[in-house]
Image (cartoon, rainbow, N blue to C red):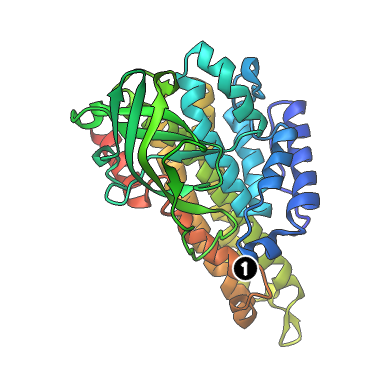
Amino acid sequence: MTDTLVERALPTPEAADLLGLTREIAAGELAPRVVADEEAGRFPRDVLRTLGQAGLLSLPFDEEFGGGGQPYEVYLQVLEELARAWLSVGISVSVHGLASYPMATAGTRAQKEQWLPYMLSGETLGAYCLSEPQSGSDAAGLVTRAARDGDDYVVTGTKAWITHGGVADFYSVMTRTSDDGHRGITCLLVPADSEGLSSAPPERKMGATASQTAAMILDKVRVPLDRRIGEEGTGFAIALSALDAGRLGIAACAVGLAQAALDAAVAYARERQQFGRPIAEFQGISFMLADMATQVSAARALYLQAARRKDAGLSYTRDAAMAKLFATDAAMRVTTDAVQVHGGYGYTRDFPVERYFREAKVLQIVEGTNQVQRMVIGRDLTR
């Protein structure tokens, strides 16, 4: 990562201090090991503990239960800086927030007092379980079943594409408690050491290999009733609300990745000489860099607009979908162009833009594919 700093208009001096702390951790803890850990496919659990101890996992949550009490406008910019240094870590922070969101927003006071401080401190790491092998974009089509048995639910099914699958300490699991379509879905907090809960081997992915993704298998897992989050049948609403927030996290990660690719392309264009001068002086390269920078700035503005609507208590579903759609498409374009600026060197693993290019693709898929985002936006415009 270069030492280029993005000038930010932050709402408070405390926010500026948080961004400064994030950059220090990114430079000192993340950047030195990203290449080795990505090549080895090694999940950096210790880094997440460090971020938890620094208070960076709890930023947007209620201070009463150990949160940072920061607006999403600030949290997302911290997330962007983390992803700029190491996308896998940015994704982990975003997904941990997504997994904690149901408890933070729909849990009872007693549940929050019991579990939320451990989630927000980073002592426990979470995973969000909605998708299944046959229900990805069609989330309401999930078939994992939770049947009442006395004071427990007995849960059977398979969850697919679970970030932190097999390494999380708790799983926020969307299950079916009745056959009443989306009204038959209930959210359960499942501890990782539950009997009958296991993970499939990690997926062999194109990029973000240090972020572990695996299917989770629930074979008659008993979950006490006091681990139900919200009432029966409210799980789908909880899931969609969590996804709105999670899409903003992915948008911020996409901007961080795109910024890293832009930084690398600008630095290379200044140094690389052809025909006796830096390639940055050629209009073809200069215009390409200008377009890349414009896309990064536009994507950042879009996620910040959505975040400010969320912070103001306004509806932001459409804005979150727009931010996720635009920012992840922009990341794909910017990382592609960064490889092009590097020429043949960009196609080798000796330069980070090759990794950025592979990593960008997944961002167009997670938290709802970009085709689903267009559906969300279109329906909101015409309903």
63 or 143, which is in the foreground?
143
Query: Taking 22 as reference, is 359 above or below it?
Result: below
Under mark 1, the amino acid is Val
Q: Which residue is mark 1?
A: 353
Horizontal and vertical percent position of residue 217:
39, 46
Q: How many numbered circles are shown?
A: 1
Query: Taking 231 as reference, is 201 above or below it?
Result: below
Q: Residue at left 68%, top 27%? A: 11
41 or 268, which is in the foreground?
41
Q: Quadrant of residue 123?
A: top right
Whether residue 318 sits left or right of residue 7 in the image: it is left
Q: Which secondary structure lies at badge 1? A: helix
**Residue 59 appearing in the image:** no
Crowding at label 1, few (<14), some or many (≥20) Cα neighbours within 10 Å? many
Horizontal and vertical percent position of residue 43:
62, 54
**Residue 339 appearing in the image:** yes
Whether residue 159 sits left or right of residue 71 in the image: it is left
Whether residue 10 sits left or right of residue 323 in the image: it is right
Q: Residue at left 53%, top 66%? A: 358
Horizontal and vertical percent position of residue 283:
61, 73
Q: Quadrant of residue 239?
A: top left
Query: Taking 193 as reference, is 34 above or below it?
Result: below
